[in-house]
Image: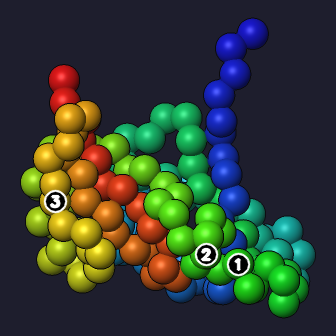
Amino acid sequence: MPQHITHFALVVRDYDEAIAFYTQQLNFTLVEDTRLSDTKRWVLVAPPGSQECSILLAKAANDEQASRIGNQTGGRVFLFLQTDDFHRDYQEMTERKIRFVRGPAEEPYGTVAVFEDLYGNLWDLIQYHQ
């Protein structure tokens, strides 16, 4: 049986601020927002056109989890957003005030730039060479 990753958790400070960032600034789709209890929600967001994988926005439930917000990987690029038109998306993201920490670069595998999400997690925006 084939397997694939359907969701992964990203620890966030607040559900609503994270939803606003991902849907308004990154133009992601809010896939689901279900209240599970007074303090817990099941919140999924995904890039436009994503078919298989979405991000579970998981509100930190304690101080240890809160200490990981924005640094779940020790400062390494954590997430990779593939695009079919790098320059279009880079321009749109810049206009929406997404902070790029490394500008566009041509690499042997494609065009890439590194940006931060609202908590400081590092992402690659990448268009692979065909």
Q: Amino acid at mark 3?
A: Pro
Side of 44 where 80 appears, left or right = left
Of marks 3 and 1, which one's residue comes earlier in the chain? 1
Mark 2 = which residue?
71
Instruction: State how far apart marks 2 and 3 are (Cα).
Output: 23 Å
Q: Amino acid at mark 2?
A: Asn
Mark 3 = which residue?
104
Instruction: State how far apart marks 3 and 1 are (Cα).
Output: 28 Å
Residue 98 vs 82, above or below: the answer is below
- At numbered mark 2, what does the secondary structure look like: helix, strand or loop? loop
Side of 123 where 126 appears, left or right = left
Question: Which numbered marker is on residue 35?
Answer: none
Residue 128, position as x, y percentages in the image: 25, 35
Mark 1 = which residue?
68
Residue for point 74% across, 85% down: 67
Residue for point 33% across, 44% down: 82
